[in-house]
Image: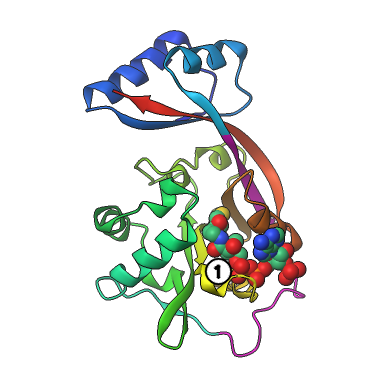
């Protein structure tokens, strides 16, 4: 859950009660500049502080210095055909980030069925016929915020407060760890933003965990800057 504004103890308790009545489970609460009181509610319900979540932004297209390397190719995701292999690569890439790495067939199928899903915006890079990396983009239209669900990328309300321009998001990006450090992540990020720019988007954004230095370093080197930071509280409600 994400708080756009500060919450009262009553609102917080109501949200927790809702989660409990729908069977409980693991909770992540994203809040910008939490007050001492909010930290108190989190602690009261057994939530502990986790790594902050950064919103990074850039103008599109990226600077012309950042081009996909010659010969670097991607293809569209093929729903149904690529699911198993993509889930395996996603799990390996996000082994240290269970909220993304734990995606199963049902979660993927739900996302592929979202009205915003476009296979051409889900770029796949193959090496020897196997998925080596991917960049899944998403277009956010002004005023039509269509995300649902429990994943942090789905709570993108923050950028709707202060911009009217539609934004192009890198929703999930990953490289199979056997191929890390070969510039595939850089090429995929550039390819994803180029795809979004081709579709007329002039704003790029993504969310990244505050301790993901390889990714933050990569995005900064492409001209992205941190626009917003959320504190994250986590726990299990039963
Ligand atoms: C982030 C990720 C996509 C980078 O992919 P990659 O192919 O290994 O990265 P590249 O080889 O293109 O390197 C790009 C830049 O990242 C940085 N980088 C990559 N690995 C790094 C590491 N282990 N430590 C520090 N910086 C690193 C470097 O700055 C590099 O810049 P350089 O070209 O000037 O050396 C990859 O590490 C990954 O899949 N991580 C797990 C999933 C993930 O965290 N996704 C991002 C979520 S927002």
Quarter of the figure with residue 68: bottom right
Quarter of the figure with residue 192: bottom right
Residue 152 placed where, x, y %? 46, 42
Residue 189 placed where, x, y %? 60, 67
Viewport quadrant of the N terminus: top left
- Residue plotted at (54% across, 23% down): 5
Q: Which residues are magenta?
A: 51-72
Asked if the beta carbon under badge 1 is closer than 8 A to the nearest atom of ligand 1, the reply is no
1 up-or-down from 180: above or below: above
Density class for disc 1 (Cα within 10 Å; few <14, some 14-19, many ≥20) is: many
Q: Which residue is mark 1?
A: 192
Of the pair 118 and 180, the residue shown nearer to us: 180
- Residue plotted at (24% across, 54% down): 106
How many marks the image carries: the answer is 1
47 up-or-down from 127: above or below: above
- Residue plotted at (22% across, 27% down): 22
Magenta stretch holds residue 105? no
Helix, strand or loop for disc 1: helix
Of the pair 153 and 20, the residue shown nearer to us: 20
Quarter of the figure with residue 227: top right
- Residue plotted at (24% across, 71% down): 80
Quarter of the rendered image showing ligand 1:
bottom right
Viewport quadrant of the C terminus: top left
Magenta stretch holds residue 65? yes
Residue 225 placed where, x, y %? 72, 50
């Amino acid at each position: 859950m994400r708080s756009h504004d500060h919450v009262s103890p009553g609102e917080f308790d109501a949200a927790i009660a809702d989660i409990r009545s729908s069977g409980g489970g693991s909770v992540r609460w994203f809040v910008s500049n939490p007050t001492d009181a909010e930290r108190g509610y989190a602690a009261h319900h057994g939530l502990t502080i986790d790594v902050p979540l950064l919103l990074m932004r850039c103008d599109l297209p990226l600077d012309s210095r950042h081009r996909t390397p010659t010969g670097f190719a991607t293809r569209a995701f093929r729903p149904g055909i690529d699911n198993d292999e993509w889930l395996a690569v996603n799990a390996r890439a996000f082994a240290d980030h269970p909220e993304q790495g734990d995606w199963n067939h049902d979660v993927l199928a739900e996302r592929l069925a979202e009205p915003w899903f476009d296979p051409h915006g889900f770029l796949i890079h193959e090496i020897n016929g196997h998925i080596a990396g991917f960049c899944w983009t998403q277009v956010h239209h002004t005023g039509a915020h269509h995300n649902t669900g429990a994943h942090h990328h789905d709570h993108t309300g923050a950028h709707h407060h202060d911009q009217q321009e539609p934004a192009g998001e890198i929703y999930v990006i990953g490289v199979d760890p056997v191929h890390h450090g070969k510039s595939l992540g850089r090429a995929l990020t550039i390819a994803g933003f180029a795809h979004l720019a081709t579709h007329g988007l002039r704003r790029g954004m993504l969310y990244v965990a505050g301790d993901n230095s390889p990714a933050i370093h990569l995005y900064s080197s492409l001209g992205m800057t941190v626009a917003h930071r959320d504190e994250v509280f986590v726990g299990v409600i039963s």
